[in-house]
Image (cartoon, helix red, strand yellow):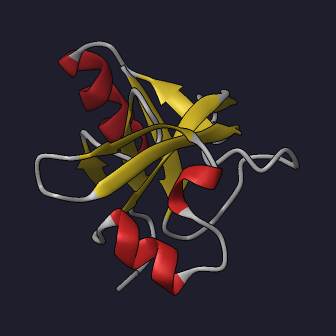
Amino acid sequence: MKFIITRASCKQVDDTGRPCEEAFLDSLPYIDEYDLTEEEYDAMYSFRWREHGTNHIVTEEGYIQRTLDLHTPFVVELNTFEELLEFSKKYGELVFSTTSSFLGAGSIEIYDDYKE
C-alpha cells in the first residue's frame, strides 16, 4: 500500500526534499472534500463547485467531494505489517492513517519533533 510520507520536523534526507530514504515522488489524484452542500460552496466561493475537477459526488457523510488534478507528493510503499514494523524501528514513532487526501494512499508522519 502507498502512504504519503511527511516528517513533523520537516527534516530532509538530501537536497531533493525527501523525508526519508525510502521516499519517492508519485503522481496521485488529489481528493477535494468540503463539509458543505454544493449550493453553500457556490455561495461562498468565486467559482462554482463543478467548474473544477471530476467525479463530483456527495459522500455518505454528506460532504461534497471531487477529484482534482494529479499532485506529486512523497510516498513510501509498505505492503506488509512486517515492512511497517521495520520502518517504525528505523524512524521511531509514526502517526499513521489509512486515509489521506490522495486517492489510493494512506498517510504516515514520522513523529520526530513536537507538533500540535
- Residue at (72% x, 47% y) in the render: 13
Q: Where is residue 85 in the image (x, y as percent from the top left)?
A: 24, 29
| Residue at 25% across, 14% down | 80
Name the residue located 44 percent from the left edge and 65 percent from the top edge.
112
Quadrant where the N terminus is found in the figure:
top left
- For residue 38, side relative to residue 30 (left or right): left
Q: In which quarter of the image is the C terminus?
A: bottom left
Residue that lies at the very extreme toward the left in this rendered image = 60
The reply to whether residue 93 is visible in this rendering is no
Q: Looking at the rendering, which quadrant does residue 69 occupy?
A: top right
Up the image or down, 27 lies above or below 114; here it is above
51 or 107, nearer to the observer: 51
> Which residue is most to the top?
79
Q: Point out residue 62 in the picture as x, y percentages from the top left corner.
A: 16, 58
Q: How many marks?
A: 0
Is the residue 39 above or below the residue 53 in the image?
Answer: below
Viewer-side residue, 113 vs 98:
98
| Image: 37 above or below 55 | below
Q: 44 or 110: nearer the eye?
A: 44
From what the image shows, is residue 109 above or below residue 105? below
Residue 89, image x, y percentages = 32, 38
Q: Give how far across and how far down residue 79 sits, in percent.
A: 32, 13
9 horizontally vs 12: left or right: left
Is residue 53 at least partly visible in the picture?
A: yes
Residue displayed at 37% across by 46% down: 100
